[in-house]
Image (spheres, rainbow, N blue to C red):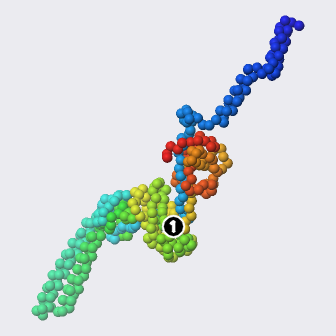
Amino acid sequence: MTMRAKSGLALLGAIGLAAISALFLGLPGWSIVAQTVDSQAAALTAEPSSDPVAQARVLAVEITRAEAVAETQSRSFAGTVEALRTVDLAFQVSGQLLELPVVAGQHVSAGALIALLDVTDFELARDRAQATYDLARTELDRAAALAERGVSADARLETARAEFAQAEVALREAGRRLTQTAIHAPFDAVVGRTFVEAFANVTPSAPVVRLQDMSELLIRISLPEDLAATARVAPELFSVTALFPAAPGYRATLEPRSFRTDADATTRTFDIEFRITGDLDPRVLPGMTANVIIGERSGNGALQAVTVPVSAVDTTSREEPTLWIYDADTSTVSRRAVRLGLPRDNWIVILEGLEAGETVVSGGWWRLREGAQVRAVNL
């Protein structure tokens, strides 16, 4: 056996003797290990420290009280926005369009000039009728004077009177046709569109300009017969609002204006027209679509629903959504499973698992653990 092997065996023997001695004699080193384990167990069962460093570990969270709101039944319908009045203006005479001083989208006041034809031919026709009228007046006066002296027969006087009457009608007609060469706005309106261009030849009754009365906006929807019957006899039971895809954030309150009592032959629905109340959003225009929501008014036996902020729902690492419930007496939190309903703006309905008035953590829950002590920063 070599010298190195002998030294190794001697070392192992020394270690074994030391272990046996520690077991039977209770050496100080063994007691040190025991004291260390005992001190760690005592630290785990000790009361929370009043040390500022320990208090700084308390998590700060935002809390919110669950609210009870009226849960009403509602139905949605697609509607179309309409102007209070929409009129297509046209000339009653033919001619060349000389002036068209308006453009689509322009606001015009009542009496403002919309379109004007070339008046030359109409003025000539009026002057011609005026000359014929003057001649007929002269002939009538001469025939009347001769008839008084007995020089002329009564038949000539009657003929003069008839010709004068015809000339008077022709003059009035020429004057009226002259006034029809111009179109003026019948009310304050917005030019919806123009159908022709300046200097084009127009014919009678051919639309030139479309005007829309925007002083009020209407929404037309079609209601099924079950809802139409109740809406007609008891409209005060319903609240009607409208949302517009073209105007995010704008919610209009509606009130009934007209109700068609004859049903559509195909769909068996009834058309009802609503008026938008309050201030009008300039983004909403005739022809746009609207989502009309008809619901029961509050106080008509509506159920109560519990709501919390959407930010309070913990959807991480769980098969079902949970909330963190805040206990004000102990300043601790606990996790609770709930069943969610539909969202309402930034809030969500809690169908099961929460009562109105309970306090939940609405911000900072991702740092929490069961029974953690927290500090509410928004109290």
**Disc 1 residue type (three-letter):** Gly
Quarter of the image holding residue 82? Answer: bottom left
The percent coordinates of residue 350 (x first, y second) are 59, 55
Q: Residue at x 71, y 29 (%)?
A: 37
Question: Does residue 24 lie above or below 377 as drawn?
Answer: above
Image height check: is 348 above or below 54? below
Q: What residue sits 30% from the left and 70% below the top?
A: 180
Measuring from the top left, give residue 138's x and y in whole percent: 15, 81
| Quarter of the image with the N terminus in it | top right
The one nearer the camera, 170 or 315, is: 315
Residue 209 visible to the viewer: no
What's the residue at 39%, 60% (across, down)?
279
Q: Residue at x 36, y 61 (%)?
A: 190
The x and y percentages for residue 298 are: 50, 65
Q: Residue furthest bottom?
A: 150
Front one among 174 and 376: 376
Q: Is residue 177 visible?
A: yes
Q: Residue furthest top?
A: 3
Name the residue beneath numbered marker 1: 299
